[in-house]
Amino acid sequence: MKNILVNLLVAIVSTSLTFYLLREHYTQVEYREVASPNVQLVKQEKEAPLNQKPRDWSMEDLPGDFVGVSKLATSAVVNITALSTTGYQMSSGSGVIIDRKGFIVTNHHVVEDGSRFEIALSDKRKFEGRLIGSDPTTDLALIKIEDGKGLPHMSFGDSDKVDVGQWVLAVGNPLNLTSTVTAGIVSAKARNINILRGAYSIESFIQTDAVVNPGNSGGALANTRGELVGINTAIISESGGYEGYSFAIPSNLVKKVIADLKDYGKVQRAVLGVVIGEVSQRMAKQNGLPDLNGVVINNVNNGGSAAIAGIRTGDVITSVNGVATNSVPELQEQVARYRPGDRISVEFYRKGKKYRKDNIILNSLSGNNN
């Protein structure tokens, strides 16, 4: 009996001590209701309309004012119809008005078979056009609208500052659909697709994925500021239509060619007087080059600009006037921007060492610098 009373007393004391300790030292946890945030599926902020690609309905995400750029560009892009002397349509394409006086830049292949040219503006006005000059080596041509005054036009942008991944607009008249605007990005620069004829043809295209089809030739490639950064020229296609690869002549080359056609009626072509090729990995290793960038000189023409300047076979040119020339098209484009008699600076590697030659006087195709 005594043991039972002792055990009961211990239980009572333990229980009392437990309640005392809980009351003195236990902090009650307060639970609050917290509102759950709205959960959204990634990139599903709104339902895509049926039968449309995502790119067609998410255009509000694009940078820049595409509406303003589109209005500016479409007003300056024209439709060109090349006619025979008897009025038969030989070809058609697009062109870009580049000043208020009515000078229009387009492709050589748009106008090469025509004798007369009919120019239609986006506002349906029509003019007669006169061919000022044409250059098959760059596929560019210059037309002048007769009696053109106060015409809408586009200003040239700097194609050297165009970056891969940058948004651009292609404006033209594809498949007889006038004043058509498409958007895309710059996919690559300095592309050579071996489409132009002639040993001295220049191909250093801006590649884009903006939709371009037959009829876009000669139209504008514009940046998001509404500047002309290229002239749409070609597509690569197995079907004959757009397949994601379109090419434009960079505006800096266009400016030089058009200035020549306006001032001289033909292109004043400067050459360095070399045969060039791409740098291979084996070549870079053998010659102590830091990387594969640059253009190797495979042959130097006797009496040419390069020979006079002391450039030798095996040298690797890396820049012209401070502009990097990492590939054959880039070197060709840089030299093509100058006229015979102009002076350039060239940086190059020779046997692992870097050199620079200043005041190299460029010659013409005929071998003189006049």
Image (cartoon, rainbow, N blue to C red):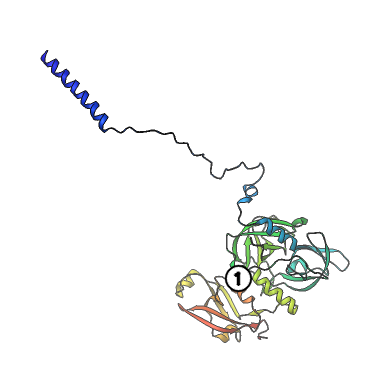
Q: Nearer the viewer, residue 60 or 359?
A: 60
x and y, in percent, of residue 338 in the image: 64, 78
Nearer to us in this view, 248 or 263: 263
Q: Position of residue 351 (x, y in %)?
A: 46, 79
Quarter of the image for residue 239 reads: bottom right
Task: Quadrant for residue 196, please give it.
Answer: bottom right
**Residue drawn 55% across the image and 77% down it:** 297
- At 24% across and 26% down in the image, what residue appears? 19
Q: Circle 1 sits in a helix, a strand or a loop, which is it?
A: helix
Looking at the picture, does residue 152 appear above or below residue 358? Answer: above
Amino acid type of disc 1? Pro
Q: Where residue 228 sits in the image (x, y, percent)? A: 67, 65
Farthest-out residue, front: 24
Q: Which residue is identified by label 1?
A: 329
Classify residue 21 as left or right of residue 239: left
Which of these two is toward me, 199 or 328?
328
Residue reaching furthest to the right: 86
Q: Let me know if residue 151 appears in the view.
A: yes
Task: Answer yes or no: is residue 311 visible.
Answer: no
- Quadrant, the C terminus: bottom right
Please indicate whether residue 320 sits to the left or right of residue 80 in the image.
left
Residue 98 vertical placement versus 239 (above, below):
below
What residue is at 49 percent from the left and 72 percent from the top? Answer: 283
> Looking at the rendering, in which quadrant would you find the N terminus?
top left
Image check: 323 left or right of 291? right
